[in-house]
Amino acid sequence: MATKSLLARNNDIANTTRQLEILSNGIFASGELPTFVTKIKETNQFPLRPKKLEILQINLGYMCNQVCEHCHVDAGPDRKEIMTLETMNQCLEVIQKTAAHTLDLTGGAPEMNPNFRWFVEEASKIGVKDFIVRSNLTIIRANKKYQDLPEFFKKHNVHIVSSMPHWTRGKTDKQRGNGVFDKSIEALKMLNKVGYGIENSELKLDLVYNPSGAFLPGDQNALENDFKKALKNDFNIDFHSLFAITNLPISRFLDYLIASENYEDYMISLVEAYNPSAVANVMCTNTLSVSWEGWLYDCDFNQMLNLKVASKVKHISTYNEELIQNRNIIINQHCYGCTAGAGSSCQGVVA
Amino acid sequence: MSKTYYDPADLRKFGNITEWNEELGNRFFDYYGKVFEEGALSAREKSLIALAVAHTEQCPYCIDAYTKDGLQRGVTKEEMMEAIHVGAAIKSGATLVHGVQMMNKVNKLEM
């Protein structure tokens, strides 16, 4: 199990240009597989354009207490990229005028940003009602200073979305690190205790399932039922919905695919599972991603590939929604990850 | 022409069998698809049955396909191994139960 990010290990894949080369070469350059552009042209969906902006997804930093095998952010304790107060203030100005109704906070572990709570409070003051925090659960148990997070989340009616690759300890710890399963279970119990995830509760607690390996997620409903049954029987834990998310072939997951000689087969699986009706609802059509430095991206994945929006406005400091919404979305072969099967987004299936 | 009898890449070409007999090929795939739908048995249970049968049939394509299918459905390694033991038990049981026939024959022939 890795304990350092690819960046700290000086791994070649930490270089985004190298990742984009890999995604354009090989089976895509030889024509064995169609590029994503070719594929969406078949159904006249090129260029991909944004629809109404609904979600502002802000990455508060790449620091995390975990080093998950599949992490597309290459997050970990050694990552020092953290959003500053200055950038947060720029975000707050934008939040005041945007048409987006949801503020989606991610990382890393967003809670590790020292100004995380201040930011949520300020955003709340200016009227944000719909908060999502992508919490890895273990952070709540990582240090005393985080143990009151469930209460804090509750106070601001934060919708919690948390990763949980399996309902068994073995599969979970293999992907996310030793001890993660037990800590996650403890954290879920704490969240249930304050009212999160309980049937009909306003306090939303959803789980995210990512496959722990070179295969695609199965049917979201069937997995949700299995998760619910197992977590209820084994630990008396409740949650609302399960989002099945496909792993995109970038960063640490790309490194894994190549090292395990699964890259080509995985890309073939993604292309074979291509679903044109998922293209219409991919998350880049209603979401805008903001990096810890304030740069703007079509999605969190493009952020990690350093593909800034194709617009005159590329930074939160010069934000102009009209200009930004009038752009073409940057696509590459990794986008097949969001259009496979029932589709995949930060809110689960889309088709 | 491949130098080996089995090529993993051939599994993806399975659908091509319809090219040489469209009607029967399509009927087979329709039937196949229906069989694995959610029914009185869940699709997950059917996947585990398929995995066990894939082993007793010793079909490498089916083993690849239903191992991956199981992983996608969140089936654990322990469940997969138990399923193929069921197949193995029936296989060995089927061999051994014929021992009764052998015993019957011996009893008939021996004085």
Image (cartoon, coloured by chain):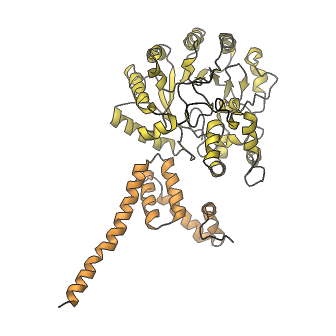
Chain colours: A yellow, B orange
Residue at 75% x, 19% y: name it: A315
- In this view, the residue in front, A28 or B96, is B96
Task: Give how far across and how far down residue A225 sits, in percent.
Answer: 42, 40
List the single residue furthest toward the right. A312
Task: Give how far across and how far down residue B24 sits, in percent.
Answer: 58, 71
Residue at 42% x, 58% y: name it: B49
State the quadrant of the C terminus of chain A.
top right
Q: Is residue A263 above or below residue A314?
A: below
Residue A83 position by quadrant: top right
Residue A239 position by quadrant: top left
- Seen in the image, is A193 located left or right of residue B50? left
- Seen in the image, is A307 located left or right of residue B8? right
- Residue A259 visible in rendering: yes
Q: Is residue B28 above or below residue A27?
A: below
- Residue B40 visible in rendering: no
* Number of dots carrying numbers: 0
Residue A46 position by quadrant: top right
- In this view, the residue in front, A174 or B56, is A174
Residue at 43% x, 63% y: name it: B53
List the single residue furthest toward the left. B111
Q: Is residue A195 above or below residue A168?
A: above
- Seen in the image, is A230 located left or right of residue B97? right
Residue at 79% x, 29% y: name it: A310
Task: Give how far across and how far down residue B32 sits, in percent.
Answer: 51, 62
Task: Give how far across and how far down residue A117 sits, in percent.
Answer: 54, 12
